[in-house]
Image (cartoon, rainbow, N blue to C red):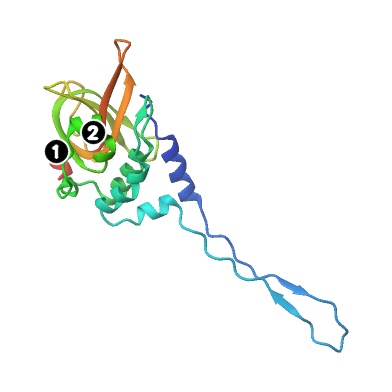
Amino acid sequence: MKKIFCMLSLAVALQGCSKPEDQATQTETTSAPSNQLVKTTDTPTPPAPEPSPMEELVQKQTLAEAVDYLKPQMTDTFNSFPEAAGYLALWWHKNGSKWNDLKDFEDAKFGKVLKDPDTERGKRICTFGSIIEIAADKSAGFTVYHAGIMDRNYKNMRVLAVGSTGEIIAQSTAKFCGIVIGKVGFENAAGGTTEAVYAVGLFDLPENR
């Protein structure tokens, strides 16, 4: 699975570089004899531009509001990064990632995510297992971590972790809770394919509480 934030990086860059358009009033002068008044016509001031999706997202005050806003964009992917996951990570980063942000969400069921992801998107899911791999991604201007986790029942989760990962490395065991984006498929080392639940959230560490 590609571990990149290309679309998110572009959106962040565009938001940081955008400036309000200068508004100017143009005056049209019509010819008239010197003994007559000169007519002027003011061009109407254009309406203010609509806020971009990124601007609307960062205005959300709670994680629940951000999740509801992004839910229509949550999709399943194969060998690619779920774009909605990047935007949710961005919101969480800007608003301070805390474990308690997850406490009021309904719990998702692993099997239901694989069966019918639309019924479980935006819900909370937790797992405890072995870290198959974990790597930092700084491409969007802040650090998140792509990780794979397998529990004792061999259930696979792919996660995007915000906040601290402490001393967690591959082969560590850890608890993770996050928001379900959907399911992802990817090619595995045996030459076949694997399906996993994909979530954005935090590892259960004191630094994240």
Distance of mark 2 from mark 1, alpha carbons?
A: 26 Å
The one of 199 and 167 positioned closer to us in this rendering: 199
The one of 134 and 7 positioned closer to us in this rendering: 7
Numbered label attached to residue 113:
2
Q: Could you tell me which residue is drawn at 46 percent across and 53 percent down?
A: 52
Counting the numbered discs, the total is 2
Residue 174 visible? The answer is: no
Quarter location, residue 171: top left
Q: Quadrant of the C terminus?
A: top left
- Disc 1 marks which amino acid? Leu
- Disc 2 marks which amino acid? Val
Q: Quadrant of the N terminus?
A: top left
Q: Are marks 2 and 1 in contact (CB under 8 Å)?
A: no
Q: Could you tell me which residue is drawn at 15 percent across and 32 percent down?
A: 127
Residue 12 percent location from the top left of the image: 43, 45
Residue 67 percent location from the top left of the image: 29, 48
Residue 133 percent location from the top left of the image: 25, 23
Mark 1: secondary structure: loop
Quarter location, residue 125: top left
* Comparing labels 2 and 1, the label whose residue is closer to the camera: 2
Residue 75 percent location from the top left of the image: 35, 36
Which residue ends up furthest to the bottom in the rendered image? 35
Which residue ends up furthest to the top in the rendered image? 190
Mark 2: secondary structure: helix
Which residue ends up furthest to the right in the rendered image? 33
In the image, residue 182 sits, relative to residue 2, either above or below, namely below
Is the residue marked by circle 1 packed among few (<14), some (14-19), or many (20+) residues within 10 Å? some
Numbered label attached to residue 205:
1
